[in-house]
Amino acid sequence: MNILPFVVVGITSGSIYALAATGLVLTYKTSGIFNFAHGGVAAATAYAFFELHHHAGLPWPLAAALCVLVFGPLAGLGIELLARGLATATPTAKLVATIGLLLGIEGLAVVLYGSAAKDFPQFLPTATFKVAGVFVGIDQLIVVLVALVGVAGLFAFFRFTRIGVAMQGVVDSSDLLGLTGTNPTAVRRVAWMIGCSFAAVSGLLIAPSIGLDPLLLTLLVVQAYGAAAIGRFSSLPLTYVGGLVVGVGAALATRFTSGYLSLQGLPSSVPFLILFGVLLFRGRLLTEVGSQATRRIVTAARFTAGQRRLGIGAALAIAALIPSVVGTKIPVYTSALAFVVIFASLGLLVRTSGQLSLCHIGFAAVGAAAFAHLAQDHGLPWVLAVVAAGLVAIPVGAMVAIPAIRLSGLYLALASFGFGILLERLGYSRDVMFGINGALTAPRPSIAGGDTAYYYVVLAVLAVCLASMALIERSRLGRLLRALADSPLALSTAGTSVNVTRVLVFCLSAFFAGVGGALIGPVTGSINGTSFPSFASLILVAVLVIAGSGLMRSAVLAAAAFIVVPSYIENATFQEGLPAIFGLAAMLTAVASSGGFGAAGRLARWAQATAWRTRRSPVTERLRGLVPDEMLPTPADGRVAEGVLS
Amino acid sequence: MTTSEGLVVRDLAVRFGGLVAVSGLSFEAPVGRLTGLIGPNGAGKTTTFNACCGLVKPSGGSVHLFGADASHMNPARRARLGMGRTFQRLELYDTLTVAENVRLGREAAISGQRLMGQLYSSPREHRDIERATAHAMELCDIEHLAQSPAGSLSTGQRRLVELARVLAGPYRLLLLDEPSSGLDSSESRRFGTILRRVMAERDIGILLVEHDMALVSSICEYVYVLDFGKPLFQGTMDEVLASEVVVEAYLGSGADLPAADDEEVLAGV
């Protein structure tokens, strides 16, 4: 069989990935904000085009022009406002904000258009011609040309225009760029408008081949991550090449794996394999931009020991009474208890140690599958099987921690997200996990066959898990983890091997997530991979962020919001829209946590920071007198000069 | 004074792209001496510090610590050889209490020595930690702040917490990066008093980067002067103050400083 047709398909889709990826790299480079919602912009554009062209009846060139030249830039302006509110946020808050936006857009699309894919006919001419024995569509040719012209134009813009050059200096040292008479905010605004227009184009071009599917559309531009990784998140030409590599790689994988059922997840995993590989093996070459400006808000009020004991006692009493109050809804609350364990384990990573994991549901899935195999197939005693499920998850956590050793912040988040998707697409269907048929039997302990009895068993396991985590938090490791979140720099210059600390916390977190996952299966008696979609890892993070501070308290509130609240909602639309609400709330929380807004005073600061014309900061003015003129940087060497001044 | 006792830097050069931040710099900071490193803004002082503790990769030269070649070690290993540092832009664990911050000064070094050190230590080590923490807090007079989150304190108090944290560590050489910036003159004097007491009590060496000439001249025994990344002068405090090159270098860039930036003005020159 000839592989050329697959190459043609690959180059076409690769060109679209390249467009999306260059837009992503452009905004990341200039703002230091990695826009997880980039795919969301693409999806929203596809829906906007659908409305304009198919519903309102505008001719496609006009509708496309409106989408790319008006809708895209407007989205860019909006995200630029969000990005400015995040200027001083921690790297984690920056990521959570755009993840929240992604969830918001995806959820809104589901509410408005339903989660089922809608048909999106190709609007470009589809006549074909023959080159070297292969049929090539006019539409495919147009896509490739659009991408080539777009990326080349952007490259020229970066190289040869003044504002393009200024973009290169804006990230690390916007104060210093301000000194040279260029307004950094204006530069960023242009970058966001261009970047989102690129996302818009890619959304329009990809929609005909995959249909209007909210999840696929928002995640498909995630393929762009792989392309951006090849471009080391900074080089535009390399990113373009990366897009083609991802596209052709996926097409060829389709060709060579067809007929092998167990490999059917491979083609769609190609971008993530590439992303994971680049992060793993080329991680040293990557430098993270915009990660220096951080500020942690310190919560002054802490509970006294007495208040805390009272709170724990009250929570336990309420938990013990729940079965006699909720009637037939006991299984919901049992699942919620299991998710308290999962949320607490995520909190150990995100809250305590400041590491972001976007594959947490994957740890739980590993635990759930391991438990079912050990308890059912191998007849291990129930409690031992639960503990062993946690232990099995540990090496998986260590596997994610390997990239985390050298990378942190953004790249860790991307690597873990990629890992979660790989696990779902390639791992879940293996026999060691859920198998191709899907459902595994997950038994309850022999002494607790009933719903109420099993509820109390889970409550007991939860109590043990939370007590252990509380002990860890107060121990030396807990101090080291919190110190790692506050200042890894101080910790490493004081002699701690922070890499070891990072691996330890990932292993611990994976262990508890595995235990939590093990508890879920016996609620219904069987378990399969669809209970653990990798996308849910994003929702977990969003829900945890809005659940407030405190490891235990936030875990309980998060589980209540994630499991209990939806079970009481009859309205299907509202239920579908819940992830969107979680996402947007997480976005606002992230902005507020950086002092962006919240209380009235903070609101004023945010208004000042996001004013249409930003004034030069006092810091800039102070620098002017203190720095010899020849030390003042040109935009291109902003990073250099800052290193000297600090 | 033997060269194996403390920090010995030879021909250090650091470049950022095309910009030479430091070149041809040699100096020693032996145990038992309070050594000063001064120079105008942009002279490369902090870059030199970062190169000494492994945060910046030098393009040339060597760094020896207590006789061992540390040029290619990571920051944690250099710290375990006995070098602790503070930061000009304070690097405290803001969400932890003051007591926890200081305690971690000791624990961080222990936890780096072996894997299990991150989890527990022997009763003897425990007593060591308690004693070092209590003593460092007493030295810096911050016992009354022990239970406050470090992020809630004033800059002056935060400087003292950072000093206490590095004093609690098992270090024989301390690198202090502009400890007086953000302090008023009475706080700065108090800082000097603490440093003198530390030098008298312990067998320790201190390398001090400082703008505040009043502080430098009151405590430093030997001073290196940097200008635009190059060594300009070295000698005892009296020799430095009498040196025409030094005064010229300082007044050249110091005369037009805005008066509002008191903390940055070179008081006492």
Image: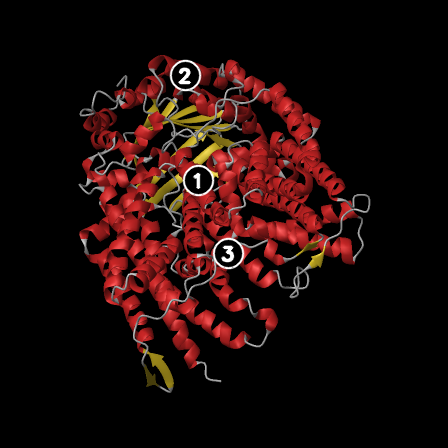
The secondary structure type at the circle numbered 3 is helix
* Mark 3 burial class by Cα count in 10 Å: few <14, some 14-19, many 20+: many
Q: Looking at the rendered structure, which numbered label has been put on residue A585?
A: 1
Residue A101, compared with residue A139, is above or below; it is above
Looking at the rendered structure, the number of numbered marks drawn on it comes to 3
The Cα–Cα distance between marks 2 and 1, rounded to whole angstroms, is 49 Å
Mark 3 against mark 2, which lies toward the viewer? 3
Q: Are marks 2 and 1 on the same chain?
A: no
How far across and down, in percent of the image, does residue A438 sit?
A: 65, 62
Residue under the point 66% across and 38% down: B116
Mark 2 against mark 1, which lies toward the viewer? 1
Q: Which residue is mark 3?
A: A418
User: Which corner quadrant of the image does residue B223 belong to?
Assistant: top left
Mark 1 against mark 3, which lies toward the viewer? 1
Q: Which residue is mark 2?
A: B192
The secondary structure type at the circle numbered 2 is helix
Task: Evaluate if marks 1 and 3 touch, with contact meaning CB atoms under 8 Å apart.
Answer: no
Q: Is residue B65 visible?
A: no
**Circle 1 marks a residue in which chain?**
A
Q: Looking at the rendered structure, which numbered label has been put on residue A520?
A: none
